[in-house]
Image (cartoon, rainbow, N blue to C red):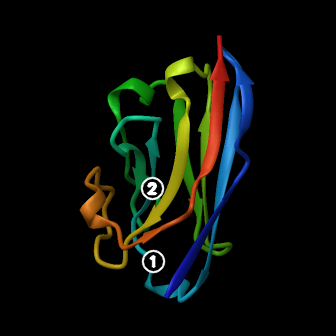
Amino acid sequence: QVQLVESGGGFMQAGESLRVSCAASGSTSSIYAMGWFRQAPGKEREFVASISWSGAQTLYEDSVKDRFTISRDNVKSTVELQMNTLKPEDTAVYHCVASSRVTYARPNKDDYDYWGRGTQITVSS
């Protein structure tokens, strides 16, 4: 089993930057692709970004592509999301995800086996 714990959420102003982190523990050798999803109130969970096992490939949702950067450290078993130029529409609970089956970055939630509980990010205008 793998446990994912997110950290770094908070209340932000539009235009500010924030970095959220996710630490994996347990059977971390079984983790391949990792990523982030988010869920805003009253909306379905949506893909934000993912990164391949090697870190060489990344994938982003269109609305964050030029503002967010995903990275990982396989030695520390962590994945981070650097978020720049935050917008009110980025307000959501951000969940870290990991796959034990897929090695390449994927946007589909069904490809991920492990989910963190999430960290709240609120962006005010």
Residue name at image x 73 percent, y 25 percent: 12
Look at mark 1 in the image and give the residue it sits on: 31
Image coords of residue 58 (percent x, y): 39, 48
Image coords of residue 9 (percent x, y): 70, 43
Q: Quadrant of the C terminus?
A: top right
Relative horizontal placement of residue 108, taking residue 26 as reference (left or right): left
* SS label for mark 1: loop
Look at mark 2 in the image and give the residue it sits on: 35
Image coords of residue 48 (percent x, y): 42, 41
Residue name at image x 56 percent, y 19 percent: 88
* SS label for mark 2: strand
Residue name at image x 44 percent, y 85 percent: 30
Image coords of residue 16 (percent x, y): 71, 21
Identity of the amino acid at label 2?
Gly
The reply to whether the C-beta atoms of the residues labelled 2 and 1 are less than 8 Å apart is: no
99 or 55, which lies in front?
99
Position of residue 122 relative to residue 49, above or below, is: above
Residue name at image x 34 percent, y 67 percent: 112
Relative horizontal placement of residue 15, taking residue 32 as reference (left or right): right
Residue 42: which disc? none
101 or 90, which lies in front?
90
Quadrant assignment, res 47:
top left
Position of residue 68 relative to residue 45, above or below, is: above
**Crowd tier of the residue under label 2, counting other residues whose Cα lies within 10 Å: few below 14, some 14–19, many 20 or above:** many
The CA span between labels 2 and 1 is 11 Å
Identity of the amino acid at label 1?
Ile
**Crowd tier of the residue under label 1, counting other residues whose Cα lies within 10 Å: few below 14, some 14–19, many 20 or above:** many
